[in-house]
Image (cartoon, coloured by chain):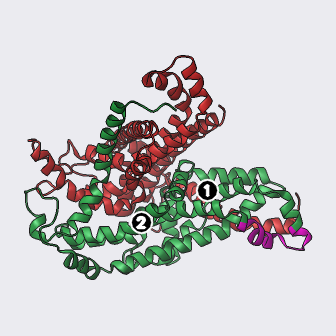
Chain colours: A red, B green
Amino acid sequence: MRVNPIHTALLLTPATVLILMLLVVPVAIVAVMSLTNWQFGAATLDWVGLANYRELLADPVFQKSISNTLTYLVVVTLGSITIGLGAALLIESDTQLRTFYRTAFFMPVASTLIAMAVVWQFLLHPSVGLVNQVLGLLGMEPRNWLNDGRSALYSLAAIGIWQMSGLALVLFLAGLKSIPQDIRDAGALDGIEHPLDRFRRITWPLLGPTTLFVVTVCAIRALQVFDTVHVLTKGGPNKATEVLLHTIYSEGFSFLRMGYASAMTVVFIAGIFFLTQLQHLAMERKTHY
Amino acid sequence: MKRPSILFRTLRHLVLMTGAAIFLAPFIWMVLTSLKPADEIFTREFSLLPSRLALVENYTQALTRVPLLRYLWNGIVVCAAILVLQIVVALPAAYAFAKLDFRGKTWAWRLVLLALMIPHQATAIPIYVMLHHLGLLNTLSALIVPFVISAFGIFLMRQFFRTVPDDLIHAARLDGMSELELVWRVMLPTAIPALFAFSIFSVVWHWNDYFWPLLVIASPELATPPLGTMFFRNEEAGTNYGPLMAGTVLITAPLVLFFIAAQKRFIEGVTLTGVKG
């Protein structure tokens, strides 16, 4: 339907102008700034071409940051998918207490992560924390989870899994519901009775696109990890938990090297764009069966 | 469906109960600790329940040491302002994309899809500099202005508006309604369920956001709940766990209670994140 162009413009202008002003143009500015040595507050800047990117490649902190981010992303995504899918299948397999289980696993998603990070700090306290107390009851050695370079990143990943599994769970539950009952019945007629068989030959192939989708959702969230790092470890000890957004934050807003931080942001945006494309692929396939 | 065997059912409960206990443990431990006096917290002995109830002390301290109610109020103001402005900006555009033809529509839509991919942290540096030059840093506006546009809101509402029958719109035009009136008086009422899901999505995101308030807010009296939590923890130097846990209980309570009261809606809203990172 066509209406008076002035009316259409009236409807569209605020949204379009704001998208350009607050999203698209700032991203373009980040890209341009990444080619300069601008520092926040400085009156002048120099074009440095790709020097920031060359510096990134040689920067040990950035390398550590990227490898930590990827480790975190893989551990958290795999962990959340495993727990989310396992719990979803178990919850669906019978009718008892379905709502309670779903609520319990989803609670961390619904809570304020920063507040819960403070709670986790207390739980992981070396001497009076619940985790070490329980381990002590089981006869195991206490650890200084967040201040030990060997365990700090994995402790944060554990908190990440705790926070994200509920999201994977409800997405898998929705995926399971969309598998038509006739297909399951047909499988039963064909003699696929054993639950493991049924999972391998019917449920899992049909869940494939859902799984790819959930993987990308979790990966995008994991790539954005910042809160727990900033609150619990500040990237330490000795850069053991330095992750991409935290490095950008330190470079840009503590050291005010905004040109250099912009180059890192470009890397971050590239990662998000890549995962989003993967997600669109998954969503297209999801609607096809 | 055939009922599984009793062995399987027992096993199912065993596994899921263990999982549920682990996932709920931080919440339970937070509430129990908020009821304990300091000497019972700082002991290596493991004890579940407090032997002396310190509810009043801990919660009074949490409410008086830092302006906790102020944080909650700031959170409400910021989330409400963001949500209302997002709707005011997104709904007319969503209607135009769903129901009107105009030149450049394909390109305009591509712009929305492009914007949909941009994470908030990506624009932090230029927007921070912009707010600095406008003199808006360390104001509540700094928490609201960058988020008044939601490409995701436009995307979601456009999908919904496409299902609204054209006859409804024609009838409204015959009644002499202008396009803008039509958006608010005809389209908005049909969109309440979708709008509700979007509201939950938006409020949960901005209520919990820590990255942006950390950058732009320095004064404690302007802090949102997550930032306030950090002011509280730093104030207590991370040692006075009773009041600190009381504080985190008060800060997590609003969303968690809302989740428990309206689970289905809440999950619907939050899982929209699936479509938007």
Which segment is the magenta one? B172-189
Mark 1 vs mark 2, foreground winner is 2
Label drawn at residue B152: 1
How far across and how far down the image is residue A86, in percent?
A: 40, 36
A241 in the magenta segment: no
Going by the image, does B208 lie left or right of A122? Answer: right
Near-viewer residue (B274 or A181): A181
Residue at 84% x, 55% y: name it.
B103
Q: Is residue A237 above or below residue B168?
A: above
Kind of residue sitting beneath label 2: Leu
Q: Relative to B210, say whether B24 is above or below.
A: above
Q: Residue furthest top?
A: A191
Q: SS at mark 2?
A: helix
Q: Find numbered disc 1 in the image and state the secondary structure of the residue it sits on.
A: helix
Q: CA distance from mark 1 to mark 2?
A: 26 Å
* Residue at screen point 51% across, 65% down: B203
Which residue was labeled with disc 2?
B257
Q: Chain of mark 1?
A: B
Which residue is nearer to you in this view: B16 or B246?
B16
Determine the main secondary structure of the stretch shown in magenta: helix
